[in-house]
């Protein structure tokens, strides 16, 4: 998929990106990270849509929840569980310990897309491995739910028959728009 198609789709779905040059930057970073990590573009765009609607902000929905994590050498570690940047990656001693204390680095789109896409790639691979070992009956939710919930998806968030997740609905909309834009480019 070309960057021009991604830019056109982003501008059509997210009008707040018009005139800012952000659509071009996001399209470049999405394509780059997709090729680097092996995660499909639709999953990166879908996760970004769910997490921030392509607004580069710090999460305010849950506020700052302080957590106590046991540490083996220095005693317990207290940290603020909060999400930052466009993909809303969490900074915890387990997920992104390198960025503890440097949370504002996630406001840089390049870093946010790199870490967020790396997390998506991790969960995609982990879900594939675990589902093969335990059988399909153990995989009740799609792999992209692990991005938010970690290793164990809550029962209330698992797949219900006939229902689609918000991210799946958005990705279908994205795919239809991409097909329409590609057909329009081929006709020209």
Image: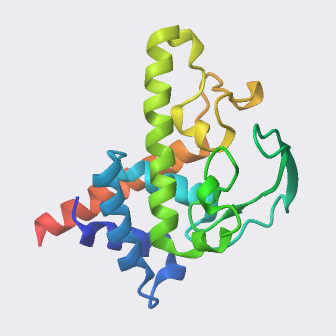
> Can I make out residue 16 in this image?
yes
Kindly identify the residue that appears in the image at 51 percent across and 55 percent down: 116
176 horizontally vs 62: left or right: left
> Residue 25, relative to residue 34: is it above or below?
below
Q: On screen, 173 above or below 70?
A: below
Please state, as top left, top right, bottom left or bottom right, where the C terminus lies in the image: bottom left
- Expressed as whole percent of the image width and height from the top left, the position of residue 139 reads 56, 19
Q: Residue furthest front?
A: 73
Q: Does residue 165 appear to the left or right of 9 in the view shown?
A: right
- 139 or 37, which is in the foreground? 37
Could you tell whether 60 is left or right of 84 in the image? Answer: right
Name the quadrant of the N terminus. bottom left
Q: Quadrant of residue 84?
A: bottom right
Residue 8 x/y as whole percent: 33, 73
Residue at image x 45%, y 35%? 124
Query: In this orientation, which residue lies closer to the viewer: 133 or 162?
Result: 133
Q: How many marks?
A: 0
Identify whether 154 is placed above or below 45.
Answer: above
**Does residue 55 appear anywhere in the picture?**
no
Q: Residue at x 79, y 46 (%)?
A: 74
| Residue drawn at (45%, 53%) of the image | 117
Q: Nearer the viewer, residue 180 or 67?
A: 67
Say left or right for 166 vs 75. left
Color theme of the render: rainbow
Q: Position of residue 128 (x, y in %)?
A: 44, 24
- Give how far across and how far down residue 185 sits, in percent: 17, 68
Q: Quadrant of residue 107?
A: bottom right
């Amino acid at each position: 998929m070309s960057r021009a198609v991604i830019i056109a789709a982003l501008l059509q779905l997210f009008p707040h990106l018009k005139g800012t040059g952000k659509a071009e930057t996001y399209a470049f970073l999405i394509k780059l990270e997709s090729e680097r990590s092996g995660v499909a573009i639709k999953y990166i765009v879908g996760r970004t849509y769910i997490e921030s609607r392509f607004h580069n902000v710090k999460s305010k929905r849950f506020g700052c929840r302080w957590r106590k994590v046991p540490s083996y050498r220095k005693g317990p570690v207290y940290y603020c569980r909060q999400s930052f940047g466009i993909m809303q990656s969490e900074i915890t001693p387990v997920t992104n310990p390198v960025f503890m204390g440097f949370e504002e680095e996630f406001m840089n789109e390049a870093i946010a897309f790199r870490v967020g896409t790396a997390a998506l790639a991790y969960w995609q691979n982990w879900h594939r491995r675990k589902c093969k070992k335990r059988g399909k009956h153990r995989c009740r939710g799609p792999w992209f739910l692990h991005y938010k919930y970690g290793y164990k998806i809550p029962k209330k968030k698992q797949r219900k028959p006939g229902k689609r997740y918000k991210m799946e609905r958005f990705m279908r909309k994205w795919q239809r728009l991409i097909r329409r834009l590609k057909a329009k480019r081929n006709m020209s």
